[in-house]
Image (tube, grey):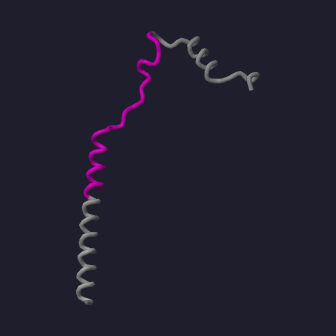
Amino acid sequence: MAEAQEESLLRRVYRIEQELEHLKRDLLQRLVTDSTAHPARKPSLFGCVRGGDITEEMIEEAKKHLFRDVKDL
């Protein structure tokens, strides 16, 4: 009886070892594919601003929209 329990435990340990190896392999594979599939992209404002150069007037208008006046608080 003790031998059967010992053999059962050894089989369970073997299965757990196999599962760990599969998990390691999957994790490493995911890390490699994620880093190569999606290279870091730089943020761009292309298309966010109407054509032409940004003028001081446009900057001041944007500041007014972003930052409320002290009177509004």
Look at 44% across and 23% down and name the residue there. Answer: 45
The x, y position of residue 54, in whole percent, is 50, 13
On the picture, is 69 further left or further right than 57? right
Q: Quadrant of the C terminus?
A: top right
Look at 41% across and 20% down and name the residue there. Answer: 46
The relative height of residue 70 versus residue 38 in the rendered view (above or below) is above
Q: Nearer the viewer, residue 5 or 50?
A: 5
The relative height of residue 10 versus residue 25 in the rendered view (above or below) is below
The relative height of residue 67 versus residue 57 in the rendered view (above or below) is below
Q: Is residue 28 one of those drawn in magenta?
A: yes
The x, y position of residue 59, in whole percent, is 57, 16
Q: Quadrant of the N terminus?
A: bottom left
Q: Is residue 48 one of those drawn in magenta?
A: yes
The x, y position of residue 16, in whole percent, is 28, 69
Look at 25% across and 63% down and name the residue there. Answer: 21
The residues colored magenta run 25-51
